[in-house]
Image: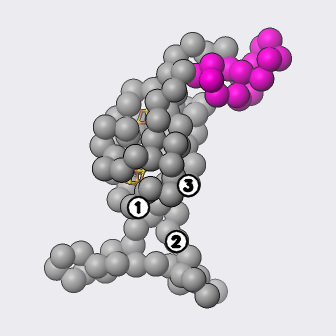
Amino acid sequence: MLQAVMTGTTRGGRSWTPTYVTALNGKRCIGCGRCFKVCPRQVFDLVDREMVADDDDDEGDGFSDDPHKVMVIHDGDDCIGCAACARVCPKKCHTHAALPMAA
Ligand code: SF4
Ligand code: SF4
């Protein structure tokens, strides 16, 4: 059975379904900053990759060995679901989902 999701309307009254960012694949991210620049809210933060623990960890210290920057989701609750970040990302890092309608 299809689950009902939250929808809104465009100015012209057409139905619009926001899709909110739910994850960002830091392994694919090249730290280009495109999603940060296009986002109208305060969702993302560009950080040093060594600040983010991941599996690229040859020393076993819990941190990546890649010295470059990586984008992270800083405040996902501020997302308005415009999906602009996904449109500009050259590496398809973002995952989005509509909000299920409250029961
Ligand atoms: S969907 Fe829109 S508001 Fe949400 S993170 Fe992406 S660009 Fe920002
Ligand atoms: S647009 Fe994609 S590759 Fe560029 S910083 Fe954002 S998530 Fe990373």
Which amino acid does the dot numbered 1 rest on? Gly
**Residue depicted at x 18% and y 76%:** 11
**Residue depicted at x 33% and y 74%:** 16
> Is ligand 1 less than 8 Å from the beta carbon at label 1?
yes
Mark 3 lies on a secondary structure that is strand
Residue pointed to by mark 2: 99
Residue pointed to by mark 3: 22
Which amino acid does the dot numbered 2 rest on? Leu
The numbered disc on residue 20 is none
Question: Is 57 situated above or below 96?
Answer: above
Q: Do the residues labelled 3 and 1 touch (CB within 8 Å)?
A: no
Which amino acid does the dot numbered 3 rest on? Thr
The quadrant the C terminus occupies is: bottom right
Q: Give the range drawn in magenta.
A: 49-64
Mark 2 lies on a secondary structure that is loop
**Residue depicted at x 36% and y 50%:** 41
- The percent coordinates of residue 38 (x first, y second) are 30, 43
Task: Tell me if 42 is positioned left or right of 15 in this view.
Answer: right
The numbered disc on residue 81 is 1
Task: Tell me if 44 is positioned left or right of 58 in this view.
Answer: left
Q: Which of 75 and 100 is in front in this view?
A: 75
